[in-house]
Amino acid sequence: MLPTPQKYFLTAACAEGNTPLTAFDRALLAGKIGNLNLLRVSSILPPGARYCPEMVIPEGSLVPVAYGYIISETPGELISAAVGVGVALNSFGVIMEFAGRCPQTRARDQIQKMLVEAFAARKLELADIKIASVEHKVEKIGCALAAVPMWY
């Protein structure tokens, strides 16, 4: 059985690269998660998980992370990514991810709406929201990424 993560943080970053994969890799590095092995997970934050914005995860670790990203090869295009964590009192949380060809404000608004809808569907009261977002104007090949890494 896998352990349940006890801590999390939010990150959002953007970068350019010479290929889509190197743009993605550089965005991961800029977001302080580039030297980790990411295990993509869906959107539930474990009960009692603590927000730790300065958390350091050992390099090479297998890390559960919910993330959204977008890569564009269209110079001048505006791309954005955002993640949000909504937490209920004495319960679990919900993570939402968004990435698109839009300004950062639209990405943040979308996250807010999705969190409200997710909590309404679960009949839970939304006690707190944290959002991280980024926008990037593509020069050659750009990536915008937002993520919620979780740790033990």
Image (cartoon, rainbow, N blue to C red):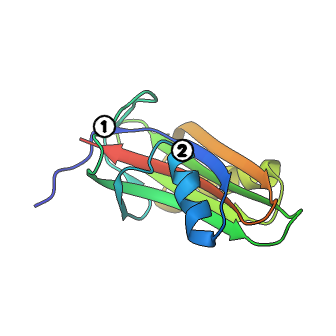
77 relative to 27 in the view: left or right:
right
What residue is drawn where x is 56% and y is 44%? 30
Residue 17 found in image quarter: bottom right
What residue is drawn where x is 80% and y is 54%? 106
Q: Residues within 10 Å of mark 2 (few under 14, many from 20)?
A: some
User: From the image, which quarter does the C terminus lie in?
Assistant: top left
The residue indicated by pointer 1 is 48
Q: Mark 2 or mark 1, which is nearer the start of the sequence?
A: 2
The disc labelled 1 sits on which kind of residue?
Answer: Gly
User: From the image, which quarter does the N terminus lie in?
Assistant: bottom left
Which element type, helix, strand or loop, lies under badge 2?
Answer: loop
The foreground one among 151 and 38 is: 38
Percent across and percent down for residue 148 are 47, 48
Q: Residues within 10 Å of mark 1 (few under 14, many from 20)?
A: some
The foreground one among 3 and 90 is: 3
The disc labelled 2 sits on which kind of residue?
Answer: Gly
The residue indicated by pointer 2 is 31
The foreground one among 7 and 31 is: 31
Which element type, helix, strand or loop, lies under badge 1?
Answer: loop
Percent across and percent down for residue 109 are 75, 51
The foreground one among 82 and 84 is: 82
Percent across and percent down for residue 9 are 45, 38
What residue is drawn where x is 57% and y is 64%? 22
115 relative to 142 in the view: left or right:
left
- Work out whether residue 92 can be spotted: no
What residue is drawn where x is 62% and y is 71%? 20
Percent across and percent down for residue 108 are 72, 49
Mark 1 and mark 2 in contact? Answer it, CB < 8 Å.
Answer: no
Q: How many marks?
A: 2
